[in-house]
Amino acid sequence: MKNILSKLFIAGALFITTSCADDYLDTVPTDAVSEESVFTTTQNAMTALNGIHRMMFIRFDSQGQPAEGSVMIMREVMAEDVVMTTTGNGWFVSITRWLNHINESSGDVRFVWRFYYKVIGNANMIIANIDNADGPQAEKDEIKGQALAYRAWAHFNLVQLFAKRYDAGGDNSGMGVPIVTEPITEGGARNSIAEVYAQVNTDIDAAIALLTTSRNAKSHLNINVAKGIKARIALVQENYSVAAQMAREAREGFSLMNTDQLYEGFNNVDNPEWIWGSRQVDDQQTFFASFFAYMSLNFSSTNIRNNPKAINSMLYDMIPETDARKGLWDPNASDPELRDPFIDELTLGSFAKIDYMNRKFIAQGNASSVGDVPYMRAAEMYLLEAEALARGGNDGQAAQVLFELVSTRDSAYSLSSNTGTALIDEIMIQRRIELWGEGFRWYDLKRLNLPLDRTGANHVESVINSKFTEPAGTNNWQFRIPRDELNANELMEQNPS
């Protein structure tokens, strides 16, 4: 059993050791199947695919590495809108200081590289074998389509993290990341940025051709998710007409949440707005290795008790009083007379109460870090469509799409009369408010070639180690290739420092 399943992981992480693979693969039947049976039927192949679904939230080497949830946190604390209010017990502090991601020996760098290549490796084994499995063609298409979408998604994340930003006006011939499209046990050289994006588009288009709206759960990828991924890719590449169309089609069938649902804690895939997310149940409790163990208001971890995550005070001040989202953060949390009573209702007696702290993310309970993790929501697709339309010169359509979203959050919001740059700026502010904490802001800064600027807000100098700014386009916007990969792969080249 370990032979074939270790190959699944070796194919994914170019330098992988087996310890984490063994821990993961020897858990439950939905994660592991034998070499003899894994691809004989579509039912067993779906079991292998379920392993990727679960890999999205399992713990890797440390408690601060709960798969995609951890990378989402990294992409937020490296930007300006999620504020680390204290150093807490140390988790994510070096990342927010812009130190870990440029350290080739960092365990976090190793984890990020390893995680996405594991997804790719498992997807490759499925893609290579599913056509020969016994079962209905519709099931083969669904399984293969999901694996292709995962491979596109993982390569897309890797190239955004480890390479320079995509330049729509350039040739993008610089170093990207290795493209892996078949089961292998040895790493290769880095493909160019242009080559990686070409492969990503090939895979996601193939996935869209195979998938339908049908799926077993929102943790699975269907055509809506695939089109949402395509919209994200097109936005980065400035293919604005494609981005707008794909975003519009991705959100078909998904309604925006109401105000009551807005305050439920962003922890439930059954929310009508969620297009894609991981459902976590009690028997999959990951304790401190969880998105909600670091981002929630209420889980009783040392990190949450001492370091509640807050919103950038300057961004908070941009939210109108009539906007229901303003209540997702408390500017008066430190004052027992003025703070949101909900904070006290959760019996957070020993927790630090720091102004502008969030109540957006709520774990299942003080003693449980269980919570469903959001990867794609209809609101993102509205904002992506609006941005693409505005950047493509379709101001009227962009304003209408923006109105459809924001009017559900702010009863006083009226159709925007802004045009051009002013309209784009308005959309981007709405994007920062709506998607706060969900893993988008650092990507947005990088794709738009914007600098990091934490000045003038509530960032704590001692927490960020005076890291208030970073100019756009420096080498520090690229994660370093992990030292383990460099040691194991003679063809690998490091990013410039």
Image (tube, helix red, strand yellow):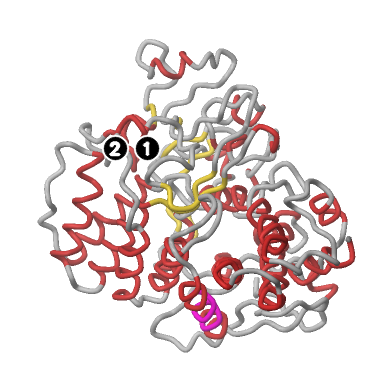
Quadrant assignment for the N terminus:
bottom right
Decide whether residue 437 is among the magenta residues: no
- The structure residue drawn at horizontal position 69% and vertical position 35%, both measured from the top left corner, is 285
Specify the amino acid type for callout 2. Answer: Asp
| Residue 119: percent from left, percent from top | 67, 64
Q: Residues within 10 Å of mark 1 (few under 14, many from 20)?
A: many
Decide whether residue 200 is among the magenta residues: yes
CB within 8 Å, label 1 to label 2: yes
Where 327 falls versus 467 (above or below)? above
Looking at the image, which is closer to me, 354 or 471? 354
The label on residue 317 is 2
- The structure residue drawn at horizontal position 78% and vertical position 64%, both measured from the top left corner, is 38
Rounded to the nearest angstrom, the CA distance separating label 1 from label 2 is 6 Å
Q: Residues within 10 Å of mark 2 (few under 14, many from 20)?
A: few
The label on residue 313 is 1
Q: Is residue 159 visible to the viewer in this orientation of the structure?
A: no
| Residue 161: percent from left, percent from top | 58, 66
Residue furthest to the top in view is 337
| Residue 335: percent from left, percent from top | 41, 15
